Image (cartoon, helix red, strand yellow):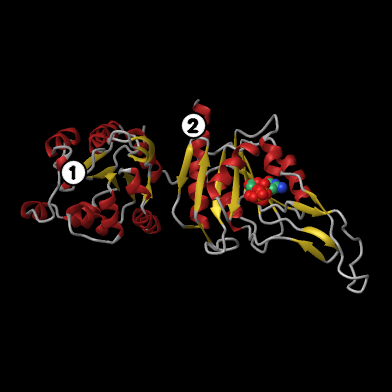
Amino acid sequence: MSILSGKRILLVVGGGIAAYKSLDLVRRLRERGATVTPVMTAAAAHFVTPLSVGALSASKVFTDLFDREDEHDVGHIRLARGADAILVAPATADFMARAAAGRADDLATAILLATRAPVLMAPAMNPAMWAHPATRRNLARLEADGVRFVGPNAGEMAEAGEAGAGRMAEPLEIVAAAEVLFDAGHKPLAGRRAVVTSGPTHEPIDPVRYIANRSSGRQGHALAEALAALGAEVTLVSGPVAIADPPGVTVHHVETAREMLAAVEKAMPADIAVFVAAVADWRVTSESGAKIKKDAGGPPTLSLAENPDILSTIGHAPDRPKLVVGFAAETDALLDNARVKLDRKGADAIVANDVSPTAGVMGGTENTVHIVTREGVEDWPKLGKTDVARRLGDWIAARLAQLEAQ
Ligand code: CTP
């Protein structure tokens, strides 16, 4: 039996060409035992008729905030309170803008403002509109308000010759995302092993000095915790950090890149490996057993050797995990560099983040990332590192399921 059985879903149908898919979505939700109360925006009626939406949902279709009869009988507050979840499909650019601004000038937005139920939006729009900074801003604001999103997907658009991210997720994807809304004990990674690296490495120069970088370990630690929350058995290999070990995770503390590689290899085999650590590229071959003295003949010359590349070693290993994900902190040519790393290191995905001084994220609490795979790039809005971790955990679970279904 579906977790949606008996659930009261309020479905807002927005005004986009993808509204025709919402008819199928109604059918799929009802097949799983949900009741569907449709609310259509004024623009939606240009694409599908209230008659067909009403017939498929076997419910009255609500359209007007100022309909005296409706307000008297049901009212937007009661509609908002009577729903276990609210789905918006398609969520147009205009709808997202109005919802992000907290407007309540039509029935659908008034309901969103009045509800305490979880809200899931399935955006659909032209790729240029989806990529526009205004839409990115609205998306980030809605995510910060707790709204969940499914899609949009990349592919052919209704407009001839247009392609890119903007197509509404398919009805069954929306149903799956709606199921996650209700599944608090959602453990898609139960029985899976995951290895995560995090933090910087320290490469000693002498007993008191070392080469390091600004990595705080926040992103890697948050990801280890998020994967564990999804049911995975997680081994975290952490360089020296000032933050606490995440709960529910086995942690190995290491100092150097070579120690990190050894700990990762020991934690194999795994289904998932995510390399978040900012590993020092070089180690000091002239490491001194004693503290180097200032007056020992002028400034010392350090000779360096390249460290092993942990991601690349595991990415190319014969028994590599099914899903290998790297991170790429870049200050220039972010996506081009990430694509090169994808192939060079044998990764399935690279999470690229901008660490130029203006973005200022290295060591900070927020991150703006892009998920680069061989199929394309997903741009995520600026999010707290915990939110990036949660979303990446969901992405990893979905990707693993997809790889295994092939
Ligand atoms: N990485 C690793 N071992 C290394 C260096 C990097 O596992 N010795 C991993 C990081 O954890 C990250 C990815 O490789 O997942 C990319 O790291 P990055 O420092 O951006 O790549 P580099 O190969 O060092 O490239 P460059 O510094 O030239 O940009």
**Callout 2 secondary element:** helix
Residue at 57 percent across and 50 percent down: it is: 223
Q: Which of the numbered marks, if any, corresponds to residue 361?
A: none
In the picture provided, is 378 more to the left or to the right than 211?
left
Mark 1 packing: few (<14 Cα in 10 Å), some, or many (20+)? many
Mark 2 packing: few (<14 Cα in 10 Å), some, or many (20+)? few
Measure the C-alpha gap from mark 1 to mark 2. Answer: 32 Å
Q: Position of residue 232 (x, y in %)?
A: 58, 42
Residue at 51 percent across and 45 percent down: it is: 371
In the picture provided, is 17 more to the left or to the right than 375?
left
Residue found at the very far top of the displayed protein: 406
Q: Position of residue 228 (x, y in %)?
A: 57, 46
Q: Which of the numbered marks, if any, corresponds to residue 402?
A: 2
Does the image show residue 226? no
Q: Nearer the viewer, residue 121 or 131?
A: 131
Q: Nearer the viewer, residue 141 or 241?
A: 141
Residue found at the very far left of the displayed protein: 69
Residue under label 1: 44
Q: Which-is-in-front pick, marks 1 and 2? A: 1
Q: Position of residue 379 (x, y in %)?
A: 45, 48
Q: Position of residue 27 (x, y in %)?
A: 25, 32
Q: Cβ–Cβ below 8 Å for labels 1 and 2? A: no
The amino acid marked with disc number 2 is Gln
Q: Earlier in the sequence, mark 1 or mark 2?
A: 1
Identify whether 303 is placed above or below 44: below
Identify whether 4 is placed above or below 97: above
Identify whether 373 is placed above or below 365: above
- Is ligand 1 within 8 Å of the beta carbon of the residue shown at mark 2? no
Q: Quadrant of residue 152?
A: top left
- Is ligand 1 within 8 Å of the beta carbon of the residue shown at mark 1? no
The amino acid marked with disc number 1 is Ala
